[in-house]
Amino acid sequence: MEVNLRGSNLIGVNLSHSILAGANLSHANLSNANLRKANLHSADLSRCTLESANLSHARLKNTNLFSADFSHANLAYADLTGGKDINILYVDDALLWNTILPDGSLEVGARYTR
């Protein structure tokens, strides 16, 4: 069963350890949400707002990241391998610590600021 949360207001929700593989979260607002250890494999996060969200240890393999806003988000130990449509990806002041980037490379530790 596919989860459709397109355009939903999910500010500050606790979705830690959730299984949202293949979910449609496009245009959703997940600012300040807790997605720690969430499974978002192949989910659609296009135009999703994840500002200040906790995505540490989250699985985001093969996820559509087009124009997703990860500003101030915690992506420590997250796996973004194979992330799609990353040509416009907002990561201002995001925490990347042992984060696997879409190209498979490992960001050992940085606070990314443009």
Image (cartoon, rainbow, N blue to C red):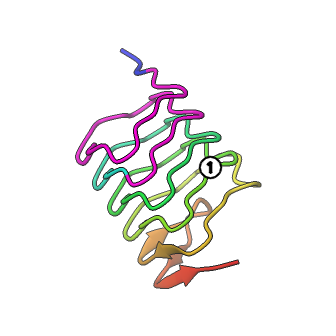
For the N terminus, give its image quadrant. Answer: top left
Residue 29 vs 68, above or below: the answer is above
Q: Is residue 19 magenta?
A: yes
- Front in this rendered view, residue 56 or 70: 70
Q: Position of residue 30 (x, y in %)?
A: 45, 45
In the image, farthest residue toward the left = 17
Residue 61 vs 80, above or below: the answer is above
For the C terminus, give its image quadrant. Answer: bottom right
Residue under the point 34% across and 48% down:
12
Q: Amino acid at mark 1?
A: Ala
In the image, farthest residue toward the right = 87
Chief secondary structure of the magenta span? loop
Q: Is residue 28 magenta?
A: yes
Residue under the point 56% across and 72% down:
105
Instruction: Mark 1: give few (<14), some (14-19) or many (20+) Cα within 10 Å.
Output: many
Instruction: Report the residue marked by disc 1.
Output: 68
In the shown orientation, is residue 85 left or right of residue 95?
right
Q: Which residues are magenta?
A: 4-32
Q: Position of residue 19 (x, y in %)?
A: 29, 36
- Front in this rendered view, residue 110 or 63: 110
Q: Position of residue 80 (x, y in %)?
A: 51, 57
In the shown orientation, is residue 28 left or right of residue 84?
left
Disc 1 element = loop
Residue under the point 71% across and 46% down:
85
- Front in this rendered view, residue 92 or 83: 92
- Front in this rendered view, residue 14 or 23: 14
Residue under the point 46% across and 85% down:
109
In the shown orientation, is residue 95 left or right of residue 103?
left
